Image: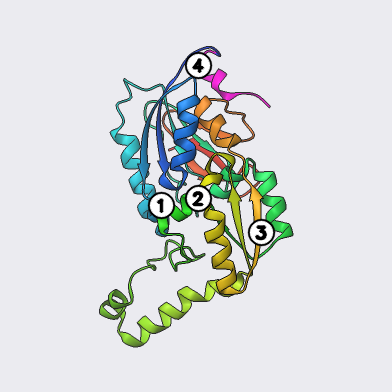
Amino acid sequence: MGNLKRNFFSDDQRLRLKVISCDVLYREICLCSAYSPNITNLDFLPKGLHDNPDIMRAEVQKKIDETDESVFDAIVLGYALCSRGTAGIKARGIPLIIPRAHDCIALFLGSNQRYLEYFNEHPGTYYYTSGWFERSGGKIVVERKVQDGFGLGKKYEEYVKKYGEDNAKYLIEFENSWIENYSQVAFIDIDFVKFLNYNKEAKKIAEERKWNYDEIEGNIRLIKNLIDAEWDEEEFLVVPPGEEIFASYDEKIIISKKQ
């Protein structure tokens, strides 16, 4: 294992980083930036972009393309693979860094390994963080579903207008069927936001749905390392200028190749 920063910059170089992140990570990114030796400019995009990975990809790429590369040394993404929403994103004239993770739960738990272990031991778990409550109202909504990116997630009236009433009813039922696969709420509690008491809200949701409830100690190590340029090659992908992110469908999760 090695820090990929050395492939592009000197060890003691203080970097100017453009951070483009989902706003579900807002508090964590801001905290890590405040304590980082690097100089960061933060740009947050709404969590709702995850409803359609194609739109998310386009919006993130737009932010990358708008970046003044004469000002920054690199761009870091506060995203994971996210239903393949970051697959296809291209680095332009400066390196692009992204965590090797399937989704942001690994970022809140501190590692892919920890997420995988909990996932395997507790199937059917719906995860919450403080950012989830603050950026989506904390409700279990149809927008968080395995069908993300297939043109769903619109209001019933929009379905009726586009597909007719019978088809609209079917689509709404289909969207909500994913909830049947869940039986537990897990709240990821991170030290510096414990005082917000969002765990009580998560527990209330579990009780309302008659699901099990668990609290997991969060860890922002990966987020901190992302901002501090501690880019271990097993945990981060550094995309060289001119290359594109691809899903690798193996333990690496993502790779980059020439366009």
Report the magenta residues as a range: 1-10
Q: Earlier in the sequence, mark 1 or mark 2?
A: 1
Comparing labels 3 and 1, the label whose residue is closer to the camera: 3
Horizontal and vertical percent position of residue 50: 42, 55
Q: Earlier in the sequence, mark 2 or mark 4?
A: 4
* Side (left or right) of 114 relative to 77: right
Which quadrant, please, contains the C terminus? top left
Checking the image for residue 214, the label placed there is: 3
Residue holding disc 4: 9
Checking the image for residue 47, the label placed there is: 1
The number of callouts visible is: 4
With respect to residue 164, does 151 lie above or below? Answer: above
Q: Please give the name of the residue rendered at 60% of the width and 71% of the height, measured from the top-left corner.
A: 181
Q: Please give the name of the residue rendered at 46% of the width and 21% of the height, measured from the top-left corner.
A: 38
Comparing labels 1 and 2, the label whose residue is closer to the camera: 2
Secondary structure beneath dot 2 equals: helix
Secondary structure beneath dot 4 equals: loop
- Residue 244 visible to the viewer: no
From the image, give the main secondary structure of the stretch colored magenta. Answer: loop
Marks 4 and 3, Cα distance to the nearest angstrom?
42 Å
Secondary structure beneath dot 1 equals: helix
- Type of the residue with mark 4: Phe
Is 211 part of what is drawn in magenta?
no
- Type of the residue with mark 1: Lys
Marks 4 and 1, Cα distance to the nearest angstrom?
32 Å
Residue holding disc 2: 130
Checking the image for residue 4, the label placed there is: none
Horizontal and vertical percent position of residue 208: 55, 73
Q: Tell me the crowding category of disc 3: few under 14, some 14 to 19, or many 20 or more residues within 10 angstroms, Cα based.
A: some
Q: Tell me the crowding category of disc 1: few under 14, some 14 to 19, or many 20 or more residues within 10 angstroms, Cα based.
A: some
Marks 3 and 2, Cα distance to the nearest angstrom?
15 Å
